[in-house]
Image (spheres, rainbow, N blue to C red):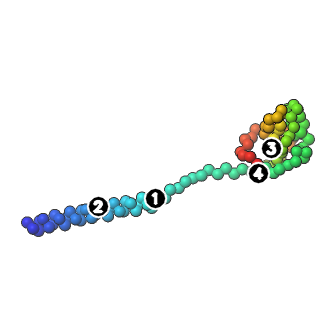
Amino acid sequence: MKKMIFGLMTMGAIFFSSQNIQAQEDKEQEVEVETTVETEVTVQEDFTDLDVMQLPQPVKDAIMTDYNGAFASQAWVKTEGDQKIYKIDIDVKGETETAFADQDGNWLEMEDEGDE
């Protein structure tokens, strides 16, 4: 009878110790889990400053024609391939609008991705 009780106690001790070991292994696995965060990076080609007087004549003409009474207050330029794109702040009756044009004075639909 003593052997039986001692055997049950031994088995109980082994059972409880194995549960404790399993719990410790689970905790270690939780600690080893790495969190990966993906960040979307937008690469923005920079426009370089340009004196408003250096805008090509077709762009100046487009401003005078399409924005009656407006004038360019600031300008930037960037080159894409063989084409130059101009970003222009246009003062229209006291309010500033940003527009984009190519070197031929054609208006382009682009989004302004940030302040210069």
Query: CB under 8 Å between callouts 4 and 2?
Result: no
Residue at 87 percent across and 31 percent down: it is: 68
Residue holding disc 1: 33
- The earlier-in-sequence mark between 4 and 3 is 4
Q: How crowded is the residue under tag 4: few (<14 C-alpha within 10 Å), some, or many (20+)?
A: few
Q: Amino acid at mark 4?
A: Asp
Indicate the quadrant containing the N terminus: top left, top right, bottom left or bottom right: bottom left
Residue at 85 percent across and 49 percent down: it is: 50
- The earlier-in-sequence mark between 1 and 3 is 1
- The earlier-in-sequence mark between 4 and 2 is 2
Q: Amino acid at mark 3?
A: Lys
Numbered disc 2: secondary structure? helix
- The earlier-in-sequence mark between 3 and 2 is 2
Residue holding disc 3: 87
Residue holding disc 4: 46
Residue at 62 percent across and 50 percent down: it is: 40
Numbered disc 4: secondary structure? loop
Residue holding disc 2: 19
